[in-house]
Image (cartoon, helix red, strand yellow):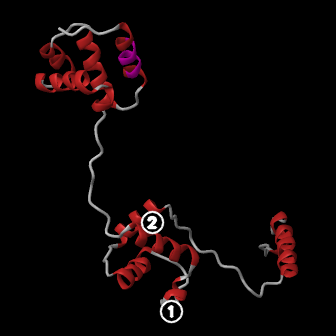
Amino acid sequence: MTTYTSEEKAIIKDLMHTTTSTVMQKRYLVLHMHMQGHTNQKIAGLVGLSGHTVGTYVNTYKSCGLDALVPKKPPGRPPFLSAEQEQKLYKTISENAPDEVGFDGIKNWTAKVACHWVSKEFGVHYKASGMLDLFHRLGLSWTRPTYVLAKADPEKQEAFKDDFEEVKKTDGRENRAHPV
């Protein structure tokens, strides 16, 4: 039977209470209970794991330490675009309008437009939902375009605002027809 130092026990107990990960909390609980002298089968019954899993956690801790208990992130699917291609996409979207890179009459980037550009530029086909995921990964966010009248007269706009405020203050009775 392995003996554990009071420092090891304190570290495990502290980690068990401070972690926000439910997976790690259960692993620390298993270690804590093992350090208290409970058998693997008893621990397994109490925490809802198999005896084999409990033994794996304990042996991993003994041989490799706490860091080895942290679950590894699965690698996932490799990206369709290389890092250089992603940077070129980012630069193109952030510095150019679509009509500047060959999409006549289109002023705003959409996922669909970006899909067409990536297909034309790199020969890689994305769906719009995949492009939105890529935008998120690249730190791009979308906003609705706002339109500004180029020929708007600021003085007339202010005069309209003042007139509109006056209309809002009246209840409109003087303009209403009264029954006879």
Relative to 171, is 38 above or below? above
Quadrant of the frame with the C terminus: bottom right
Could you tell me which residue is drawn at 39 percent across and 11 percent down?
7
Quadrant for residue 23, please give it: top left
Most common SS among magenta residues? helix
The disc label shown at residue 135, or none: 2
Could you tell me which residue is drawn at 47 percent across and 76 percent down?
110
Residue position marked by numbered label 1 in the rendering: 104
Q: In the image, 56: left or right of 151?
A: left
Q: In the image, 110: left or right of 122?
A: right
Quadrant for residue 169, please give it: bottom right
Q: Secondary structure at mark 1?
A: loop
Pinpoint residue 39: horizontal percent, then vertical percent.
15, 11
Q: Earlier in the sequence, mark 1 or mark 2?
A: 1
In front: 18, or 160?
18
Which residue is at the far front? 63
Asked if the residues shown at circle 1 and circle 2 are in contact, with their CB atoms under 8 angstroms apart, the answer is no
Pinpoint residue 64: horizontal percent, then vertical percent.
26, 27
Residue type at mark 2 is Phe
